[in-house]
Amino acid sequence: MPHTMIPDELPAEPAAELTPAQVFALFPPHGDTLPSLLASRAAVMPDAEAVLFQSRSWTYHLMSEAVETLAAALVERGIRAGDPVAHVAPNSDVAVLLFLALARVGAVFVPLNPALTDDELHYQLQHSQAVAAYAPQSLCARVEQIAARCACPARVAPLEPFGLDAADSAAALACIAGESPTSPAPLPMPSPDHPAVVIYTSGTTGFPKGVVHSQRTVVWSAEVFVGRLRLQPRERMLTVFPLFHVNALFYSFAGALACGGTFITAAKFSASTFWQTAADTGATQLNILAALGTILGLRPRSEFNPAHRIRKIYGGPISADMFRLFRQEFGVPLLIEGYGMSEIPSTCSNPYEGPHKIGSIGRAGVHPRFDGPFAQLRVVDDDGRDVAAGETGELLVKTPTMFVAYLNDPQQTADAFRDGWFATGDLVRMDTDGYFYFVARKKDIIRKRGENISGAELDAVLGRHPDLAEAATIAVPSELGEDDILAVLVARDGAAPTHEAVIDWCRAHMAAIKVPRYLVFADALPKTPTQRVTKHLLKKDAALIARARDMEAAPAAMR
């Protein structure tokens, strides 16, 4: 990915870092919609780079023109306000143009993972009731076959006429213009409460839910992210995450728009070329998840390019080892750990000004444009009573960035709330300074001999074994009632750990009750697109469980 320099004629960044309020004051007020946010930024810095994808660089002015032209083309193709429109493709600049153009029309962007199986993709197309689906020409035949199985099949169309294969942004704009009417009718502006996007959850516990967000919740989440990382005008924000995930769409892309920065992406993530890409594009900010940090930490240091300019990282969980890795080895001075879900983006984070508490997901989120509290957080027991500081309970949240509803599922929407508070299903604790700490998913709790054991805690301990790349623990039935513990292990490349060596490690680093009874080696762990382990698939894998070795059995009886 070539580096595109900021035009020389633009004023230099101020020597002093701007506060979020000062950043927002650079631009005219907007109307809490995506089109008005784009127009506000384009009015002040039309020639600044807004999006970089491969060889295509879009200024704010050019992107604004493309969005208006593409919106007219979509209307010409029959798209109307409120229509769900699917995007089944890897990341690209055309993807974000489509997102903004649909927002301009008042339609709903439904980004879907092209790597889904046919049945999974059919479920999401059927459930979303998409009226149209855009995909690369190479995927259109497959998407058409899948859409044909839906009760109301989506119209499938290629992305190439919108410039997907164009040599540069000017050529892409020419493609879009060729699809647009010569004298389009003026479009009414959408309202902040118009649904803007449906994000399908990762589906770690079954069928994914369609999380509906409004234009306002996307814009406000982006502005919270500006405050969270003290983003500056023309920050260069690199994402390696897919645009069907809140992290990439709300934080990286919309966050870049909110601060007047540059959004940088690629069609797919390459670990081997990551640091060279970061250096070539001049990226200054990156979002990570634990898996990404682990992957980069395991790569040969010969791939590292010290000329990179990344100075700010947001993500989680960020362990002490990961802090050390990125600060000392990779030269990134600021890492901010936070927490959110598809339903409740921008919930909490460690404050930019500090103190930064390693292992904490931080304090309740604030919005730079509003005085006083923004997100509200509670920790409650099973009866809904608030627990004392230091005690573990379920996290409940109220926030203005709350999702609108689960798509076409009023019962699940209602069930997600307790007296107006969103029930996250996550167990946390809060210290006396108001910092929160993630403990485990409620459904990742293993009940053994009357004790609650966190699967995430066991995964982390096993993951520190020098010969293991990663591990996942699940509950399996015990003949004594309740649960026993099974650990699925993935060895590091070139390593050959034995069952006995792993169990010895567990006994040295865990309380006896936490030591897994069963061990099994696997080539890889099943994961969501955002690299979360899908433990429900491990629990369903009868062959995997049958291969597991019972470490409490006599040697002759071991499988």
Image: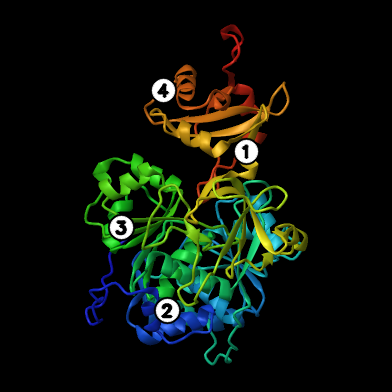
| Badge 3 amino acid | Ala
SS at badge 1? strand
Image spot of residue 336 (x, y percent): 40, 56
For marks 1 and 2 on the same chain, the one whose residue lies earlier in the sequence: 2
Q: Which quadrant of the structure image shows residue 280?
A: bottom left
Residue denoted by label 4? 496
Could you tell me if residue 164 is visible in this image? no
Q: Residue at x 38, y 76 (%)?
A: 260
For marks 1 and 3 on the same chain, the one whose residue lies earlier in the sequence: 3
Image spot of residue 141 (x, y percent): 60, 59
Given residues 449 and 85, the one toward you in this image is 449
Which image quarter holds the C terminus?
top right
Residue denoted by label 2? 63
SS at badge 2? helix
Residue denoted by label 3? 278
Callout 4: 10 Å neighbours few (<14), some, many (20+)?
few
Q: Can you tell which of label 2 and label 4 is closer to the viewer? A: 4
Q: Can you tell which of label 1 and label 2 is closer to the viewer? A: 1
